[in-house]
Image (cartoon, coloured by chain):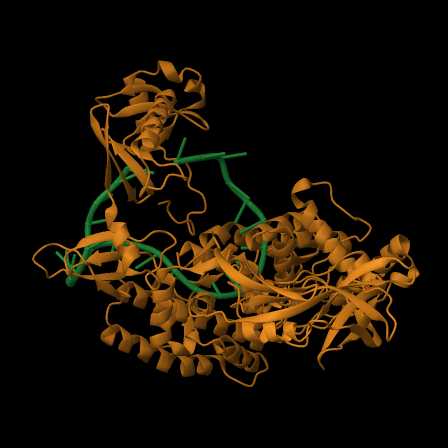
DNA sequence: CAGTGAGCGAGCTTCCGCTTGACTT
């Protein structure tokens, strides 16, 4: 055992640092937090000043045991966890668990994994900062209180029996999506007319070039637009003046977790979890620096490296050293920005991670490159028949600079409304007269804010200071898993728009159609998400406030700076919060999210949409009526808030009987697992393109035949009496009894078709007696 | 796999943040 034991959080980091520090140091990883609050009684003794009760989670026992042994065998332990609140707390937990004295144990920190940074850190150890540790404990305890007191309120007050949850981060994330959805639903588009004139002119080489100029303003009505065109009839067009202005563009900062997720989403179409998975691979294979970071900083070594790569590949004038500052106040900057470990690796071989690596390489390189230089030309054009004027503008790239490598993508809401990129203008001269090809006034509609993508939601959360780099992807997954939010596409609808064209001094009127409102891979709130959000907003507006996290973060900072006492801060939060919990439990009604849609024309009974135990539904009639109410499930794309009476009544048309096939009735319906057909007591899932409301017998009958044969082919053997089947699955033959599947031992796989009842029973008993090892028992949810 | 939909209530669920693992029902 080496003289010194250094503990860091990540194993990949341990490996790198181990190489730098040499033989006197053994570097080990603790794999993040090694202790957490126990779950019983929230793991907090509230009466005893919020005293936390920590345990070592099952999956950390092994690591802790190993660390204990190593700590015993070494002369000195160095705590080298990340330099932020969480890292400090991890070091403190290590002290507690390994029996180290916080008053003498060496604590070292570095923001980058480079030789000079680490050697410097080792020369200047400090001690544990208990104020920072206490700030973390306050954070941890507050989150536990909020989560574990709010969630049970939902279990009691919602009419669903899912495992509902609420928390400081996830509930606000859902709220953002719910509010955006309502904003879109309540949005009414207004239109205006935009004038564009198309000219041809000769450039200096006497070549004819077309270009476009824009009208003086947008016209609110078609009459105003027409009047303007009318006033241009017979006009001559002359260049009045030309201004040329230099401009520049600068590169974006190197990647943080959040910006990497955004760019990978915009440019590669990756979900945030896919991005993180690939980044993790690159990190573990030593290709990039740590991928969970909020820092835009590059180490000196990286900057020098980048400079060398730029000068070599593009030449000296393309290089410009830049240091970026973080805009985000909540950043804790324990690491570097995400960058390639070695800039000279321009790409990686692995096809999985290649595209993401290329993106990181380009972004990093571009961040150290020169500005792009532009020249923006604006020409004002006189109209002889009135005193309005047209404006033509164009942009010319004088020096590409960083654009040679990389340009950051834009989100939908940052795009200028419908404007294409500025083209180039021909070289014009003042007083030059121009030929008008045509002038158009096109109707354009205002657009609501776009729905969030996973990545744009992360961006918003980061702006609000909610969540951390390590939790963005898991949070997005959680709110989808809880069925508060779903990611899906939406088909657009056709919308007509009007165009007025002035050509050869005649005005013509046309109508064209565009597709509007189409969405791809966007986050939509479910009815459940909306109802839970409304409930939490109503009773817990404090926690649901967008500024709540920012507010408590400043208090955590005060604790970290020794200006506030952690359990007093918790006490101030807890008392009113807990009282509110009690009041809500006592007084709030059970929530159904009921919406009255109108009366059923057939029976005259009221039709309501609401949340049932099994999800959103519509109901005709009341429970107290003599005749039982009728129920129907809402379709995937429908919502309690927006469904109309007509759409609701349509839902009651199922189940439909299609007719007879092979002497049995065929009917279709929508069940727990989607649309299905029923025939001869057996069920067949309908194909995606089959609509249960319109599908006919001649489409369903072949499906029944097809599925029946497929099933026969999958069946190897059936023991009817024992309800045992031997089936062929994607991993080879297996045994099925009732609903349970059993693995056939390797040695019998090849002779699976020859198994007798007795042998099959023996295998079942054997598997039951020795169940296969379960993985990650602590956190794994049982499959549904 | 393919019903259901009131209320009661067995016994269960739940947070955020730090880290990777594992061998298919």
Q: Is residue A92 above or below residue A709?
A: below
Quadrant location of the C terminus of chain A? top left
Q: Is residue A34 above or below residue A758?
A: below
Residues A169 and A136: in front is: A169
- The residue lying at 59 percent from left, 49 percent from top is A277
Say which colour chain B has.
green
Quick one: which residue is furthest to the bottom in this view? A563
Q: How many marks?
A: 0
* Residue A252 drawn at (x, y percent): 73, 65
Residue nearer the viewer, A124 or A392? A392
Q: Is residue A766 above or below residue A395?
A: above
Q: Residue at x 34, y 21 (%)?
A: A712
A542 left or right, relative to A453: left
Q: Nearer the viewer, residue A97 or A419?
A: A419
Q: Which chain is orange?
A: A
- Res A198 seen here: yes
- Residue A596 position within the rendered picture, expressed as x and y whole percent measured from the top left: 25, 66
**Residue furthest top in the image:** A754
State the image coordinates of residue A229 (x, y, percent, origin top left): 64, 72
């Amino acid at each position: 055992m080496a003289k010194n034991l250094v503990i860091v959080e990540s194993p990949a980091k341990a490996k790198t640092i181990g190489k730098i520090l040499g033989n006197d140091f053994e570097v080990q990883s603790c794999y993040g937090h090694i202790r957490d609050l126990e779950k019983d009684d929230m793991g907090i003794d509230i009466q005893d000043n919020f005293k936390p009760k920590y345990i070592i989670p099952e999956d950390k026992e092994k690591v802790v045991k190993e660390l204990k042994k190593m700590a015993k065998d070494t002369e000195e332990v160095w705590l080298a966890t990340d330099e932020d609140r969480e890292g400090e707390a991890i070091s403190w937990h290590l002290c507690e668990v390994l029996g180290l004295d916080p008053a003498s144990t060496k604590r070292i920190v570095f923001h980058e994994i480079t030789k000079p940074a680490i050697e410097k850190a080792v020369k200047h150890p400090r001690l544990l900062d208990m104020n920072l540790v206490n700030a973390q404990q306050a954070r941890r305890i507050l989150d536990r209180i909020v989560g574990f007191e709010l969630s049970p309120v939902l279990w009691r007050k919602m009419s669903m029996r899912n495992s509902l949850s609420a928390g400081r981060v996830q509930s606000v994330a859902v709220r953002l999506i719910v509010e955006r959805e309502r904003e879109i639903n309540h949005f009414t588009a207004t239109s205006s007319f935009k004038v564009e004139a198309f000219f041809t002119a000769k450039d200096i080489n006497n070549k004819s070039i077309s270009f476009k100029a824009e009208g003086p303003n947008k016209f609110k009505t078609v009459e105003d637009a027409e009047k303007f065109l009318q006033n241009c009839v017979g006009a001559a067009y002359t260049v009045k003046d030309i201004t040329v202005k230099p401009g520049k563009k600068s590169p974006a900062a190197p990647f943080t977790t959040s910006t990497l997720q955004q760019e990978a989403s915009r440019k590669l179409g990756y979900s945030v979890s896919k991005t993180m998975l690939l980044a993790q691979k690159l990190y573990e294979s030593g290709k990039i620096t740590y991928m969970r970071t909020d820092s835009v900083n590059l180490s000196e070594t990286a900057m020098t490296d980048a400079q060398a790569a730029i000068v070599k590949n593009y030449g000296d004038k393309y290089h410009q050293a830049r240091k970026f500052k973080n805009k985000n106040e909540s950043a804790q900057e324990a690491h570097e920005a995400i960058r390639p470990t070695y800039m000279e690796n321009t790409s990686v071989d692995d096809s999985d991670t290649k595209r993401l690596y290329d993106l990181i390489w380009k972004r990093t390189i571009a961040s150290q490159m020169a500005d792009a230089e532009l020249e923006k030309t604006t020409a004002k054009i006189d109209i002889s028949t009135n005193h309005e004027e047209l404006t033509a503008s164009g942009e010319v790239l004088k020096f590409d600079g960083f654009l040679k490598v990389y340009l950051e993508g834009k989100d939908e809401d940052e795009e200028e409304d419908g404007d294409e990129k500025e083209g180039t203008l021909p070289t014009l001269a003042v007083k030059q007269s121009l030929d008008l090809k045509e002038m158009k006034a096109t109707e354009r509609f205002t657009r609501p804010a776009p729905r969030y993508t996973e990545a744009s939601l992360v961006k918003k959360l980061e702006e609000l200071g909610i969540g951390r780099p390590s939790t963005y992807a898991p949070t997005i997954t959680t709110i989808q898993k809880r069925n508060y939010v779903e990611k899906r596409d939406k088909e657009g609808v056709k919308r007509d728009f009007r165009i007025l064209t002035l050509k050869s001094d005649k005005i013509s009127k046309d109508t064209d159609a565009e597709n509007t409102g189409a969405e791809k891979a966007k986050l939509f709130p479910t009815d459940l998400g909306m109802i839970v959000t409304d409930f939490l907003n109503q009773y817990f507006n404090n926690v649901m406030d967008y500024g709540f996290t920012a507010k408590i973060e400043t208090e955590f900072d005060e604790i970290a700076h020794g200006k506030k006492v952690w359990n007093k801060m918790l006490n101030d939060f807890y008392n009113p919060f807990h009282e509110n919990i009690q009041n809500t439990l006592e007084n709030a009604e059970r929530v159904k999210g009921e919406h009255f849609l109108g009366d059923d024309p057939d029976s005259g009974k009221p039709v309501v949409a609401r949340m049932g135990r099994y999800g959103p539904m519509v109901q005709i009639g009341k429970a107290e009526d003599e005749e039982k109410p009728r129920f129907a499930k809402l379709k995937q794309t429908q919502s309690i808030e927006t469904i109309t009476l007509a759409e609701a009544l349509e839902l009651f048309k199922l189940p439909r009987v299609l007719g007879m096939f092979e002497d049995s009735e065929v009917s279709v319906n929508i069940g727990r697992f989607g649309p299905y057909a029923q025939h001869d007591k057996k069920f067949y899932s309908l194909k995606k393109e089959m609509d249960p409301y319109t599908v006919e017998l001649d489409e369903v009958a072949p499906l029944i035949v097809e599925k029946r044969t497929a099933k026969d082919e999958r069946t190897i053997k059936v023991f009817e009496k024992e309800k045992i089947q031997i089936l062929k699955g994607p991993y080879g033959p297996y045994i099925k009894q009732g609903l349970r599947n059993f693995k056939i031992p390797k040695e019998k796989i090849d002779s699976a078709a020859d198994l007798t009842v007795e042998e099959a029973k023996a295998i079942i008993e054997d598997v039951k007696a020795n169940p296969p090892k379960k993985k990650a028992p602590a956190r794994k949810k049982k499959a549904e």
